[in-house]
Image (cartoon, rainbow, N blue to C red):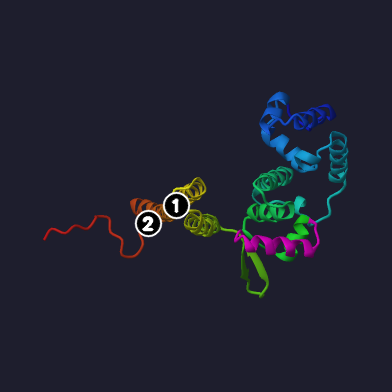
């Protein structure tokens, strides 16, 4: 599989493939490239309807020139914890942004969310987000408002009474629950339509089938989300218990621990 940056000829092939209505995976197969490379290339250069090979190539050259300029001291690219490759982290963040965009999130909201998820703390202030993404505070404010309305981020206050925007595991659970319950209103309205249109008629049957389907799927999603949440928490507790057990085996017991398991022999 070839590596390196896309060539101008490859970008022309991408444009031709989009014009022919080919899927990203098929274009990637023809170019012997990862599908993620094609997806990222298209989404960062106008999307499937606005992609132009010449413009995309020129924009890439300009980005490359900017990256070759000296990086200001103290910027995100200047240092990464845990010995991470700064360039690799930046490219991954762009990939994650692209994936979020393809799922339906607008670009700036995707950038903010990707930035939060690739931060070890999982939380940043508005000013920190603006500095990391090199955008205006107004852009961050608009993105955060949208993400909060979707319950994809949570607001907290730190010790200095600054608002911090947080992503954590529980947000996925809440998102799944909200998604399932968003269908409840349609289910209720559809069943009202059955009474209006007349039970047994083609239109009423169509609405009833839709309501039953969404009702069943919604209940299944809620049940699965609750089970997954319980399993994840149980896994965490089990890990802690395993650690305690290992310490006991090596003699590093805490107060009250015993080497022999207790038993009730009457």
Identified at 40% across, 56% down, the residue is 237
Q: Quadrant of the C terminus?
A: bottom left
Query: Quadrant of residue 229 in the image?
Result: bottom left
Magenta range is 134-152
Q: Is residue 93 left or right of residue 175?
A: right
Q: Is residue 251 left or right of residue 112?
A: left
Q: Is residue 81 left or right of residue 56?
A: left
**Viewer-nearest of discs 2 and 1:** 1
The location of residue 58, given as percent across then percent down, is 88, 38
Labelled pair 2, 1 in contact (Cβ < 8 Å): no
Above/below status of 180 relative to 154: above
User: Does the magenta run of residues contain 148?
Assistant: yes
Instruction: Tell me, for residue 252, which label it has, or none.
Output: 2
Q: Residue furthest left?
A: 266
Identified at 74% across, 63% down, the residue is 142
Mark 2 or mark 1: whose residue is earlier in sequence: 1
Is most of the magenta stretch helix, strand or loop?
helix
The location of residue 37, given as percent across then percent down, is 71, 35
User: Does the magenta run of residues contain 230?
Assistant: no
The residue indicated by pointer 1 is 199
- Which element is circle 1 on? loop
Q: Tell me if mark 1 has few (under 14), some (14-19) or many (20+) residues whose alpha carbon lies within 10 angstroms of its own.
A: some
Identified at 67% across, 70% down, the residue is 163
Q: Quadrant of the N terminus?
A: top right
Query: Quadrant of residue 41 in the image?
Result: top right
- Which element is circle 2 on? loop
Q: Tell me if mark 2 has few (under 14), some (14-19) or many (20+) residues whose alpha carbon lies within 10 angstroms of its own.
A: few
Query: Quadrant of residue 259 in the image?
Result: bottom left
Identified at 75% across, 42% down, the residue is 43
Q: Nearer the viewer, residue 59 or 234?
A: 59
């Amino acid at each position: 599989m070839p590596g390196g940056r896309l060539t101008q000829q490859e970008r022309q092939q991408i444009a031709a493939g989009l014009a022919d209505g080919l899927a990203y995976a098929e274009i990637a197969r023809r170019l012997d490239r990862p599908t993620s490379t094609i997806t990222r290339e298209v989404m960062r250069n106008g999307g499937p309807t606005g992609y132009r090979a010449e413009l995309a190539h020129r924009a890439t050259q300009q980005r490359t020139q900017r990256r070759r300029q000296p990086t200001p001291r103290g910027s995100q690219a200047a240092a990464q914890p845990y010995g991470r490759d700064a360039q690799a982290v930046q490219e991954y963040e762009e990939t994650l942004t692209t994936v979020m965009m393809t799922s339906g999130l607008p670009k700036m909201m995707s950038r903010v969310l990707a930035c939060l998820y690739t931060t070890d703390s999982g939380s940043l202030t508005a000013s920190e987000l603006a500095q990391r993404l090199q955008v205006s505070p107004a852009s961050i404010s608009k993105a955060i408002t949208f993400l909060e309305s979707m319950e994809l981020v949570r607001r907290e206050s730190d010790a200095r009474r600054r608002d911090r925007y947080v992503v954590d595991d529980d947000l996925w659970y809440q998102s799944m629950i909200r998604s399932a319950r968003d269908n409840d209103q349609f289910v209720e309205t559809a069943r009202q339509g059955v009474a209006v249109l007349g039970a047994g008629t083609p239109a009423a049957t169509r609405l009833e089938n839709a309501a039953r389907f969404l009702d069943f799927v919604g209940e299944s999603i809620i049940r699965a989300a609750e089970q997954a949440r319980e399993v994840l928490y149980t896994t965490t507790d089990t890990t802690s218990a395993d650690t305690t057990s290992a310490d006991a085996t090596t003699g590093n017991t805490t107060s009250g621990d015993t080497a022999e398991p207790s038993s009730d022999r009457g």
